[in-house]
């Protein structure tokens, strides 16, 4: 969709049902472009990869990813986090674990 198309819809607003189909098609095209560009990507598996140097964020994993790595249930990982055996941070309602903390837990 060109910027002219978008401006035409914005300015013209359409004049009834005749243009509704075209406007819906353009909206679907925009949505598909956004999906293809990753605009709606969820971050169930977040994270910043650690780069060497000051200020780099550690690589974080979710309890589900840790559970997969350990071959246990996610509930077991969360229990270990809550007990303090496995070090992690609860951000809002979500736990996050550094890969180093997981290595230390196994070590």
Image (spheres, rainbow, N blue to C red):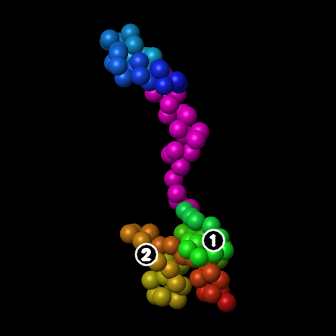
The quarter of the image holding the C terminus is bottom right
Residue 80: numbered disc: none
Residue 71 inside the magenta-drawn segment = no
Residue 29 in view in this figure: yes
Identify which residue is drawn at 63% across, 71% down.
50
Q: Nearer the viewer, residue 2 or 100?
A: 2
Identify which residue is drawn at 48% across, 88% down.
84
Q: On screen, 21 above or below 50?
A: above
Q: Is residue 16 left or right of residue 90?
A: left
Q: Residues within 10 Å of mark 2 (few under 14, many from 20)?
A: few
Residue 90: numbered disc: 2
Q: Which range is magenta?
A: 24-45
Q: Nearer the viewer, residue 39 or 102?
A: 39
Residue 68 in view in this figure: no
Residue 29 inside the magenta-drawn segment = yes
Upstream in the sequence, badge 1 or badge 2? 1
How far apart are the two marked residues, 1 and 2, measured between alpha carbons?
19 Å
Which of the 4 quarters of the picture holds residue 15? top left
Q: On screen, 27 above or below 85?
A: above
């Amino acid at each position: 969709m060109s910027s002219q198309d978008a401006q035409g819809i914005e300015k013209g607003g359409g004049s009834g049902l005749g243009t509704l189909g075209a406007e819906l098609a353009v909206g679907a095209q925009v949505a598909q472009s956004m999906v293809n560009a990753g605009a709606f990507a969820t971050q169930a598996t977040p994270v910043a990869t650690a780069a060497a140097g000051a200020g780099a964020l550690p690589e974080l994993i979710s309890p589900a990813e840790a559970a997969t790595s350990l071959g246990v249930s996610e509930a077991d990982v969360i229990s270990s986090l809550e007990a303090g055996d496995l070090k992690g941070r609860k951000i809002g309602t979500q736990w996050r674990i550094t890969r180093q903390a997981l290595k230390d837990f196994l070590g």
